[in-house]
Amino acid sequence: MKYMLIGLMLISGSAFAYPDTPVPSKSSAQAMVLSAGYVCSKVDAVTPFIASNGYTIYCNDFSYAYEVSLAGGQATLKAK
């Protein structure tokens, strides 16, 4: 069930993304996570938020998720 919900979010997420959210490439997202001191051997997906400016980075077969909030020109990354 968990993977089905994640799959639905991945399929429909970009169609309903918050306007003008810059979504990085997988390699840039991985570099951001690693530079913050978190674990990310492989990026599975980068999905934009629907109702706010930011995105979620999923790593290591969806075992880890990190939220990146964008506000005032600054990006804030935190583990979910």
Image (cartoon, rainbow, N blue to C red):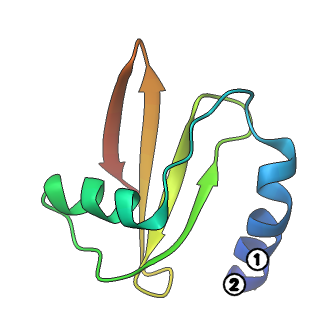
Three-letter amino acid code at the position of disc 1: Gly
Above or below, comparing residue 69 to residue 40 in the picture:
above
What's the residue at 28%, 53% (across, down)? 32
Residue behind mark 1: 7
Determine the secondary structure under disc 2: helix
Position of 72 relative to 13 (above/below): above
Tell me the quadrant of the picture where the N terminus can be found.
bottom right
Crowd rating for badge 1 (residues with CA inside 10 Å; few <14, some 14–19, many 20+):
few
Place of residue 69 in the rendered image (x, y in percent of width and height, measured from the top left): 45, 34
Res. 2 image quadrant: bottom right
Hey, which quadrant is residue 43 in on the image? bottom left
Q: Nearer the viewer, residue 37 or 63?
A: 37
Q: Is residue 39 above or below residue 65?
A: below
Do tag 1 and tag 2 residues touch (Cβ < 8 Å)?
yes
Q: Secondary structure at mark 1?
A: helix
Lateral position of residue 70 relative to residue 51, left or right: left
Tell me if mark 2 has few (under 14), some (14-19) or many (20+) residues whose alpha carbon lies within 10 angstroms of its own.
Answer: few
- Across and down, in percent, residue 7 comes to 76, 77
Q: Residue furthest top?
A: 72
Query: Label 2, on which residue?
Result: 3
> Residue at coordinates 83% horizontally, 70% vertically from top-left?
8
Nearest to the eye among marks 1 and 2: give it.
1
Left-right relation of 28 to 70: left
